[in-house]
Amino acid sequence: MQLGLDGKVVLITGGSKGIGLACARAFLDEGAKVGIVSRSRDNLDRARAALGPVAGTTADLVDPAQALAALDALEAELGPVDVLVNSAGAARRVPPGDLTPDRWRAAFDAKLFTYVNVFDPAVKRMAARGTGVIVNVIGNGGKVAAPTHIAGGAANAALMLATAGLAQAYAGSGVRVVGVSPGLTRTDRVAEGMQAEAALQGITVDEAQARAEAGIPLGRMAEPEEIASAILFLASAKASYVTGVTLTMDGAKVAVVV
């Protein structure tokens, strides 16, 4: 399928690892001009060495000034952003008894505000140009509560509402805003989360992963490339009437109608 992404400027936050890195590869394969943002210089350098022709910059997106500087730098190098994929930041999973107000705030900074600080200036610039797509990679923890992911799940839920609200607010300006909420996906973040699950259940990490996968009707975690394929479609003109929704990709683990 020709998705019409050739020459499009795509900015991917969290583009040096996991789902973000898979997205960078997928957009490059479609002929897009890709820029990635990472908090870590080492991760950024490794990703650029692996990907080839991508622009990149480091920024801690919890800081709105750094987020704006990253957007400015990549637009100066590549041109106005046509597609923004937010995939940076993940709240640390902790047992509920270990939650504190500071950890709640850290969870919202890590997940919600790393997105807000980029999509707020980006959506306004897109609206001024009359075109653009934002895809927020959120996480199914925003719909289904988990004991070790209460604070992070609450941040995800806020992102789902923000996605719907922005889509409605900017639809008349030619901007689409959609979300993708993966379930368990084979990434470093999920591997770290399994350690918290294992500690809570008093089992090994391997046992925690086996139990988690056993609860997925498809019988396995998603691969980052599978999530990236859906994001690619949603970002393309083939999905021109899709906005304001969040696509769940959890292998049918939570079979609900919403």
Image: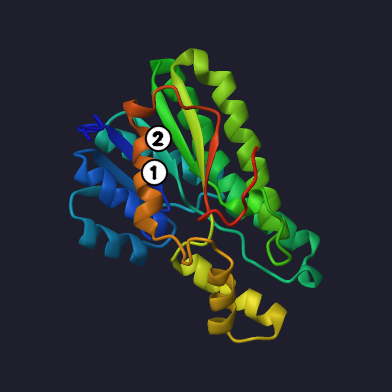
Mark 1 surroundings: few (<14), some (14-19) or many (≥20) residues within 10 A? some
Mark 2 surroundings: few (<14), some (14-19) or many (≥20) residues within 10 A? many
Residue at 37%, 34% (x, y): give it: 235
Residue at 81%, 71% (x, y): give it: 97
Q: Position of residue 220 (x, y in %)?
A: 46, 66
Answer with left or right where residue 77 lies relative to residue 23: left
Q: Position of residue 68 (x, y in %)?
A: 47, 38
Q: Amino acid at mark 2?
A: Leu
- Residues 59 and 246: in front is 246
* Residue 15 visible in the displayed image: no
Q: For residue 200, what is the image quadrant? A: bottom right
Q: CA distance from mark 1 to mark 2?
A: 6 Å
Which numbered disc covers residue 17? none
Q: Which residue is mark 1?
A: 230
Q: For residue 75, what is the image quadrant? A: top left
Circles 1 and 2: CB atoms closer than 8 Å: yes
Which numbered disc covers residue 234? 2
Decide: is 120 above or below 169.
below
Residue at 60%, 30% (x, y): give it: 164
Answer with left or right where residue 42 lies relative to residue 127: left
Answer with left or right where residue 91 lies relative to residue 58: right
- Residues 209 and 192: in front is 209
Q: Amino acid at mark 1?
A: Ala
Q: Tell me the SS state at disc 1.
A: helix
- Residues 183 and 58: in front is 183
Residue at 26%, 51% (x, y): give it: 25
Count of numbered circles on the image = 2
Which residue is outermost to the top?
Answer: 172
